[in-house]
Amino acid sequence: MPVKQLRIAMVSAHSCPIGNLGAKDTGGMSVYVRELAHELGKQGHLVDVYTRAHDPKDRQTYELGQNARLIHLEAGEVEDIQKLIVYSYLPDFAYNLENFRKHNDLQYDLIFSHYWLSGLVGEYLQQRWNVPHITMFHTLGAVKNTIGIGEDEPGLRIETERGLTQNCHHIIAPTEKEKEELILHYSALPGRIGVVPCGVNLEQFKPVSKESARQYLGFGNDKIILFVGRIDPLKGIDKLIKAMPYLQNIQGLRLMVIGGGEHSQREIERLQKLACNLNIQDSVTFPGLIKHEQLPYFYSAADACVIPSYYESFGMVALESLACGTPVVATDVGNLKSVIRQGETGYVITDNAPHHLADKITLLLSRLSTDTESVLSIRASVSRFSWSNIAEAIIRECQLVLANYLAPVS
Ligand code: UDP
């Protein structure tokens, strides 16, 4: 049966989907919004993604692909500002969004908001437009505070997430775990939560031969362990650095920590100091932010990718690495237990204790096979996470929500 074309207003107020990935507030969510919008457009839906203008060089409108646009709206200074300051400009953002919509004579079938700040905008628009509001939190403040690593999330965030859970029409959770957390911490109604995993761009993330990738990047024959992500205490990078001394018997081993940006400098310095104290500073490098388009070379050049996080809503980096044929060692966070095949495409461990990480990295490197067949079989293990599959699943959720919303009350 042909799928009815939907007109979707996506809101990603604080984090620009075309911003610098791997910087403090720009990571998996930006990739998610950009890729999903692009794919939904490709499948014939009309998608407008609204975000806050943060760079004077930004144009107001960008094409994200067929039928999909990104629209920058003014709200506060046109520069990077802290999330809680963005909060105070949300009324301006919502007002400018509504003006843009009216001025351009746009109508939407539903709103899909991302993160609690955008959830508030979605709630406001929902009341004016009388269309359903679907939200996705990407991380939950209450869970972050339970873990207790890094800065505490403010009560404002927790209360907003709780309120949104009750008031929105539907929630997309990327994992069953997040669904349970929404029920546990915010008393969410199970029937209002749809579980749809995150995706990976399989055209972009594909294997390059290890030799060519290393040659392209100017790497030698070292064994390379890769970390990719925002430089945030919740990512457990310190535990991975502390795992390095346990791996000293592996000749020429190097850890590469990718991610950064100016707001991450202090955390990078803390990690560099830790490496110095452990006397492994020559084996740990911090190349900074790497463009998403360049990452397939890094994943392909690496022998293993490690995700030592305390918390991930999903963990998209694992999908990217596996799509490039590189195995992953990860803590049991997000959806990684169902993404990684134990002993086949990597290992999932119960916690990020340095000796646990080191044990599994050693095992992985000793069993590593770089033949084409193994690389392709690692890649095949994530083919179900193509954005086309994910977009279709999101549209099924939207249609269910719309059917319930439009159904006459008996
Ligand atoms: N990323 C990037 N360049 C970097 C660091 C990270 O493009 O220097 C991307 C990475 O490829 C991934 C995203 O940022 O797509 C991080 O997503 P993930 O879900 O792993 O973490 P989150 O940011 O949601 O905590």
Image: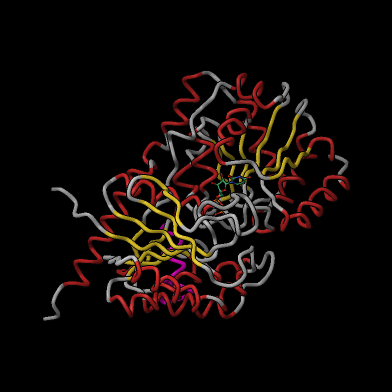
Question: What residue sits 53% from the left and 50% below the top?
Answer: 315
Q: Nearer the viewer, residue 389 or 104?
A: 104
- How many numbered callouts? 0
Q: Quadrant of the C terminus?
A: bottom left
Q: Position of residue 158 (x, y in %)?
A: 53, 77
Left or right, 289 with respect to 244, comes to left
Question: Is 139 above or below relative to 212?
Answer: below
Look at the image and give the residue range highlighted in magenta.
175-187
Question: What residue sits 69% from the left and 31% below the top?
Answer: 224
Q: Position of residue 230 (x, y in %)?
A: 64, 52
Q: What's the coloring here?
A: secondary structure
Q: Position of residue 19 (x, y in %)?
A: 57, 53
Question: What residue sits 62% from the left and 19% below the top?
Answer: 211
Point out the residue furthest to the front here: 103
Q: Position of residue 125 (x, y in %)?
A: 37, 75
Q: Nearer the viewer, residue 96 or 349?
A: 96
Q: Nearer the viewer, residue 181 or 326?
A: 326
Question: What residue sits 76% from the left and 35% below the top?
Answer: 247
Point out the residue furthest to the left here: 410
Predominant secondary structure, magenta span: helix
Left or right, 283 with respect to 14, comes to right
Q: Nearer the viewer, residue 54 or 215?
A: 54
